[in-house]
Image: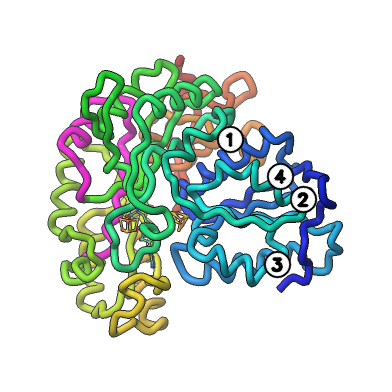
Amino acid sequence: MSKITAPKTPPGQAPKTYRVKNFGCQMNVYDGERMGEMLDGQGLSAAPEGEDADLVVLNTCHIRERAAEKIYSDIGRMTKGKTQEKAPMIAVAGCVAQAEGEEIMKRAPSVSMVVGPQAYHRLPDMLGKAVQGERVADTDMPAIAKFAALPARKRRSPTAFLTVQEGCDKFCTYCVVPYTRGAEISRPFDDLVAEAHTLVETGAREITLLGQNVNAWSGPDGAGAHQGLDGLIREIAKIPELQRIRYMTSHPNDFTPGLIAAHAEVDKLMPYLHLPVQAGSDRVLKAMNRNHTAGGYLRLLEQMREARPDMALSGDFIVGFPGETEAEFEETLQLVDEVRYAQAYSFKYSPRPGTPAATMDNQIPIEVMDDRLQRLQARINRDQRAFNDASIGKTCDVLIERKGKHDGQWLGKSPWLQSVWFEAEPDQAALGDMVRVEIAEAGPNSVQGVLRETVAV
Ligand code: SAH
Ligand code: SF4
Ligand code: F3S
């Protein structure tokens, strides 16, 4: 651990540059952007790539093992061998800050600020105190107050995240999110529509609506009528320059017929659904407190494919939940065989302090988890490759997100969230353009295509 016990800045002298390091989910990425915007508002600027920053914000994730330990080693690396004047001021934000704020303050004296995910709108105040040499922690959970207190959006990128819902009331027995992010809240309809407009005005052509349970979003619209996520999607789809809408992450129990229908009716809503299932065994799902069965999940996917036959599916899996037998694990493999995911994420079960599963009997040995993870990932990779191979010969819209390494090389996303590489002359392509690309080659994680035409917006 670091020996540095106070921030670099002499009292009264504020840091000039900052870097936000994001870990964890997209909601952390969104929060990281908003913290950056707040720091910009305080007169700081983002440190150029490769240069040390005066203030480093570690925006942490607590979802799986030793996330906290990683934070301490990161802090150690940033301060090791440095004099007090050379070491950066450090803020710990995100879900580890929420879960272990006090311990961080005790264990890492070089940390100046600890700020939870619902309290970061108070970052400017905290910074003012930290500059005076005070160490400050804020892990209150006022939830909605945060959004109201944040400055206006001013990011510039073709794709944008928009957090519409936060927190979780589901209490899956393995998961820390209900403890680190608090109860489910939905941001107000009008605020979200206004933020979507601002994002589009600053260049966004695709917006991904975010929430730990995004399809649980609900609230009254401007006229007072009750709306679900589909109502919000339909409203945002009216913004003319906005081309694409996505949403994540959904819970199988929060789908409404309206949201399923929106996939058939709203052209801008992309044919891609990330819907975690976690396991294929109903006994394991029950022990996880998922409140759905494997069969119910598969029926839901069928309805989705009826609404949108080309829907690409994605999921999350946990292997080695306490008590999971080999036969139960094989039910997960069967489910994967049935769904044929376009992509999916799989994790070894990680006991999280304070969650019910952490103290359950029959914790699974690590070698067994390693073996199951490998077998599951082999199938997922097989299906992802098959999905990519099946796109060869198709021509699809690609929204350009960034330049490639070589001159004239560009990277964008297909409607099904595949990364698409292609080449174009300088006058044929620019960031944020929608172009039509014919897919010519497929790899495990991306596809390559040939530019066919630029699509007029
Ligand atoms: N709200 C979403 C995502 C939650 S976190 C949902 O309900 O699905 C993202 C993923 O991390 C989860 O879907 C789950 O697969 C994984 N995860 C959560 N807690 C975990 C734990 N204790 N061990 C291993 N994986 C975990
Ligand atoms: Fe965690 Fe379950 Fe809530 Fe997802 S639904 S955030 S896995 S408790
Ligand atoms: Fe991690 Fe918190 Fe997201 S624990 S996954 S950063 S909600």
* Position of residue 159 in the picture relative to residue 266 (left or right): right
State ligand 1's quadrant: bottom left
Ranked by sequence position, the earlier of labels 1 and 4 is 4
Query: Was residue 276 drawn as part of the magenta stretch in this picture?
Result: yes
Q: CA distance from mark 2 to mark 1?
A: 41 Å
Cβ–Cβ under 8 Å for marks 4 and 2: yes
Which of 27 and 206 lies nearest the eye of the viewer? 27
Q: Residue at x 18, y 59 (%)?
A: 291
Q: Where residue 202 sits in the image (x, y, percent)? A: 55, 23
Which residue is label 2 attached to?
132
Q: Where residue 397 sits in the image (x, y, percent)? A: 41, 28
Residue 59 appears in the picture as rendered: yes
* Position of residue 369 in the picture relative to residue 122 (left or right): left
Ranked by sequence position, the earlier of labels 2 and 1 is 2
As helix, strand or loop, the secondary structure at mark 4 comes to helix
Q: CA distance from mark 4 to mark 3?
A: 18 Å
Which residue is label 3 attached to?
109
As helix, strand or loop, the secondary structure at mark 3 comes to loop
Which residue is label 1 attached to?
402
**Ligand 3 under 8 Å from disc 3 Cβ:** no
Cβ–Cβ under 8 Å for marks 2 and 1: no
Of the two numbered discs 4 and 3 in the rendering, the one whose residue sits closer to the viewer: 4
Which residue is label 4 attached to?
128
Q: Amino acid at mark 2?
A: Gln
Of the two numbered discs 2 and 1 in the rendering, the one whose residue sits closer to the viewer: 2
Q: Amino acid at mark 3?
A: Pro
Q: Where residue 33 sits in the image (x, y, percent)? A: 57, 40
Write the start and end of the magenta stretch as one range. 253-280
Q: Where residue 372 sits in the image (x, y, percent)? A: 34, 74
Please tell me the numbered disc located at residue 451.
Answer: none
As helix, strand or loop, the secondary structure at mark 1 comes to strand
